[in-house]
Amino acid sequence: MERTLVNKLANNLNKEIKLQGWIHKIRKLGKIAFLLLRDRTGIVQCVINTKEINLDGLKLESVIELTGIACKSYNDEKNYEIQTKSLEILSIVKEDIPLEVNKDTLDSNLDTILNNRVLSLRNLKINAIFKIEAAIAHGFSKFLLDNGFTEIFTPKIVSDGAEGGTELFKVDYFGRNAYLAQSPQFYKQMLVGAGYERVFEIGHVYRAESHDSKRHINEFVSLDLEMAFIKDETDLINFETNLLKYIFDYLKTNCKNELEILNVSIPTITNGIPMLSLSKAISILQEEYNKTDLTNDIDHEGEELISKYAKEAFNSDFIFLTHYPKSKRPMYTMPDENGTTTHSFDLIFRGIEITTGGQRIHNYEFLKENIVKKGLSPKDFSSYLNIFKYGMPPHGGLAIGLERLTYRLLELDNIREAVLFTRDKTRLNP
Amino acid sequence: MERTLVNKLANNLNKEIKLQGWIHKIRKLGKIAFLLLRDRTGIVQCVINTKEINLDGLKLESVIELTGIACKSYNDEKNYEIQTKSLEILSIVKEDIPLEVNKDTLDSNLDTILNNRVLSLRNLKINAIFKIEAAIAHGFSKFLLDNGFTEIFTPKIVSDGAEGGTELFKVDYFGRNAYLAQSPQFYKQMLVGAGYERVFEIGHVYRAESHDSKRHINEFVSLDLEMAFIKDETDLINFETNLLKYIFDYLKTNCKNELEILNVSIPTITNGIPMLSLSKAISILQEEYNKTDLTNDIDHEGEELISKYAKEAFNSDFIFLTHYPKSKRPMYTMPDENGTTTHSFDLIFRGIEITTGGQRIHNYEFLKENIVKKGLSPKDFSSYLNIFKYGMPPHGGLAIGLERLTYRLLELDNIREAVLFTRDKTRLNP
């Protein structure tokens, strides 16, 4: 007999079927037991005559195969239950499991949840997080494919940091020093110039930052894109707005169940996303919230307050901050005509930066000059810099942190809840 | 005016349009010049009156914006050309470019091609390779999503090697020793057990092997999948067969142009893929090819010869080798009932192994025993081993090397031609 999935019971009413899955719960009432079987698609109640099938000592979370007749539920016409005929144990649990995974909400602390990752993921709410995260990545990739982008796979072992800098993990590469890539920045620009024009990558990036906050991890998935023939950063801002709308619609269609389980409301983006220049944002923070410690950058408290402001003033969960000063942006960022700010932006979502983006410099001499102005040496960037000699179109791009977007979208307490296996200063296991 | 792409000319006949792209070729004939403009979708001839538009000194591969009227081609009714009105240079090339990218086939050697990656990728044939490679990855992901799989993102910084071993790149992780993952093996098994049942990952894996062959690179993209509730390895073999059929159909639909440019014929899989046990394959190699140096494994020459045999005997580009001996498989491989071979297989495609797969052990005691038998210590695998205590379904999986599949599918000379930016013993740049 072929296996039937729990979400296909409607097609198999009054037939004998075979189910496979985990024992979610058992409740005994005299000679009758009600066993909840859980598979990847749902949970179904199986009615068992304990005189015929002995359940003594059978522990929760054991893996079983069960045959029976699929019926309408006795108590709930819209639901199904199984009149069990046979039960076989495929994988037995001998010890009591250390987490009550069948609870609505796991009441363990984050460390216990992460240490027992495989078990905590069996909890329906925690399980749903990663189906949504995967769907965000698919929505991203689908929108870009529909818009003429080519997916790229670029190296994560690199000889230098893209941002010319610090906070790199060092790799012993056949006796040579190498590093883990902080971003695919140089490679995606190079591939725009290679004629693909529009490229995207979904891949791990690495930051050896040693802070220990709710919103930082050291290995994360970056949703990166880069596109040629843009006018300026406003093309990117509009593009990201449409991209996010698409992803949210994709989630509403493809993750109905999971969104319900987590009781999440997806933000609606109706008339675009509001924008403020960074300097305007800083003066709003001064005037409205008496936050006077910012000059030409924004800190985490500032991000939270400006999100609050965006919600109150524009009824928006998102806000673009634009015109970051040259001093705060990497050497490849296109300066504004005024010479002090840049064609760049951040996107703040519910109190946290989820995107940095902007137009890049595409002129060889100008880029070389800018590298020198930043106190860096053009020699160190030669394989990147050289491509600008041979016909590089105007271009720009952005990156979305997948775990950050998931973390804020689902309003989780800590970004680590949006990572299957967290890598941070202390955590290298499991 | 909005930009028109070269592949949208048919919709804009006799209209004034704006094109953007690279100068692929220029041919001057008296007062008339024919400029081939190349964008990401194709190439179009632009007719230019050189009395009105001065092309002197304009080098190939410069990026231009051009306006003109889209017409049917004078010489070829099925084609289009542009009667140019204006031309603006967006990004100038000052030096002659070091590669003749507009040639049908680049005649440079591999090192030159890889050193000048951005330029070599502008060659139509080389450019097409990576559109096909991206489409293989999409086909893979689409088939798995349609079959109830969840995409996963697992850490590439790990505390131990999955295969318990050697050939690992070492990372300095906040002063602790860590390694780059050789495969997502343990994680994908853990996530099967976490209730997702069917998971896949498209991600980089790392092998610090120092050999220097046409078919090895040190960082590659692994198309990994793992699935629960299989009967044995034959379920995986059938699944991979259908997956490959799907990917090839996907390429035929989505990469028509690129397959034509590369003049590639996609293999057809009609009645499944032939299978041979490894021992049977070894005796065929002895009898048919007088290859007598194999006992219980196959080497590269053996893979090439058995492919030759598969072509001659079964008219197949693929062959599954099954029943590998226990001694040649990792500790998590499910042994056969006979105690000497395993429920595992390799898939050989046109002379090279592109997949290793098999059923895994799902019983805690049995796995622990097997770890000890392999001379390893269960303590070193505790975070992996522990999950088998709490209800692990029967399962198995496989991995396909993306670059290897591309390399053999396109019949390239070297796997490096199927990598955007190669990482090997000597190459860490660009």
Image: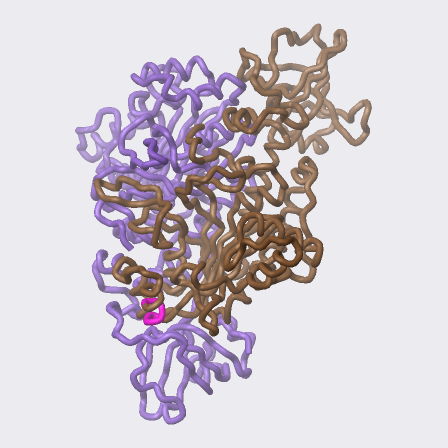
Chain colours: A purple, B brown
Main SS class of the magenta portion in the image: helix
Q: Is residue B413 above or below residue A264?
A: above
In the depicted view, which residue is nearer to us: A79 or B142?
Answer: B142
Q: Position of residue B230 (x, y in %)?
A: 49, 69
Residues shaded magenta: B364-368
Q: Is residue B255 left or right of residue A314?
A: right
Give the residue at x 46% y 65%: B359
Q: Position of residue B36 (x, y in %)?
A: 68, 21
In the depicted view, which residue is nearer to us: A36 or B24?
Answer: B24
Give the residue at x 61% y 7%: B57
Q: Position of residue B335 (x, y in %)?
A: 44, 68
Q: Is residue B316 left or right of residue A35?
A: right
Q: Is residue B29 left or right of residue A402?
A: right
Q: Is residue B203 left or right of residue B248?
A: left
Q: Does the magenta run of residues contain A10?
A: no
Q: Is residue B48 above or below residue A145?
A: above
Q: Position of residue B380 (x, y in %)?
A: 27, 57
Give the residue at x 26% y 42%: B173
